[in-house]
Image (spheres, grey):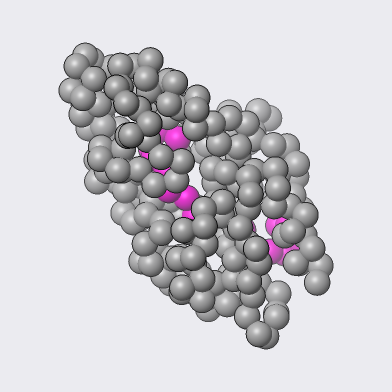
Amino acid sequence: MIRHDAQDRMPAVLLFDLGGVVFELGYEEAVRRFSALGLKNARTHLDASVQTGIFGQLERGAIDKEEFRAAFSELVGHEVSLSDCAHAWLGYLKSVPEENLLLLRALRARGFRLCLLSNTNPYMLDYVRSSAFDGKGHSLDEYFDALYVSCACGMMKPERAIFEHVLAQEGVAPQDVLFIDDSPRNIAAAEAVGMRTLLAEDAYRWKEALQSRLED
């Protein structure tokens, strides 16, 4: 699904989601890891795109890593460590396809401004911004010009405010942004503010559609 404005000009900003686009999501592994820590009915607490409860508070930036750890320990009835929490959250990261990273580098080399817009939390953010991210000593920052993440912005997709925040920070009109995300709800929210959109089926199936659009 690609939508663009009538002027059909090249987008100034390519705005990418993280999980399900840049990296392959491992929802089932995240459920398994949180369950192993004692979280009952983990599926009712966890979501592939928008979290609620203390999980949502962490991703919104309303609580920090230590506050989450303490609240989660109370929820499961025993103490868990920060590393336990990090391990569980990282279950969401199944793999980082090399072809995705190569394309991101190629797009930047062509002069596109690449930005990230993700609902994520400090545990995941610490990992992807470390040299461990791509397995070759490079962090996520080396693939993007700017990172807009929910836990730092205090807002989450699909809220209109977070899309308007990106537009204000980038200083561009909505029609000059092409937003790539795997959530129909987030795609609809981006279209509501006037952005062009591309719905990714998963982390492996968006590159051809994006390159075709940019070549056109």
Quadrant the C terminus occupies = bottom right
Q: Is residue 33 left or right of residue 38?
A: right
Question: Which residue occupies 45% across, 66% down?
Answer: 189
Where is residue 161 shown, x and y percent of the image?
36, 66
Question: Which residue occupies 63% across, 49% down?
Answer: 201
The answer to which image quadrant residue 22 occupies is top right
Q: Is residue 78 above or below residue 161?
A: above
Q: Is residue 77 left or right of residue 94?
A: left
Q: Is residue 161 left or right of residue 76?
A: right
Quadrant the N terminus occupies = bottom right
122 in magenta: yes
Where is residue 144 shown, x and y percent of the image?
60, 52
Question: Which residue occupies 55% across, 36% down?
Answer: 25
191 and 108: which one is in front?
Answer: 191
17 in magenta: no
Q: How many marks?
A: 0
Where is residue 86 shown, x and y percent of the image?
40, 25
Where is residue 69 shown, x and y percent of the image?
26, 26
The answer to which image quadrant residue 203 occupies is top right
70 and 36: which one is in front?
Answer: 36
Question: Which residue occupies 52% across, 57% down?
Answer: 184
Span colored in magenta: 107-124
Is residue 57 visible to the viewer in this orientation of the structure?
A: yes
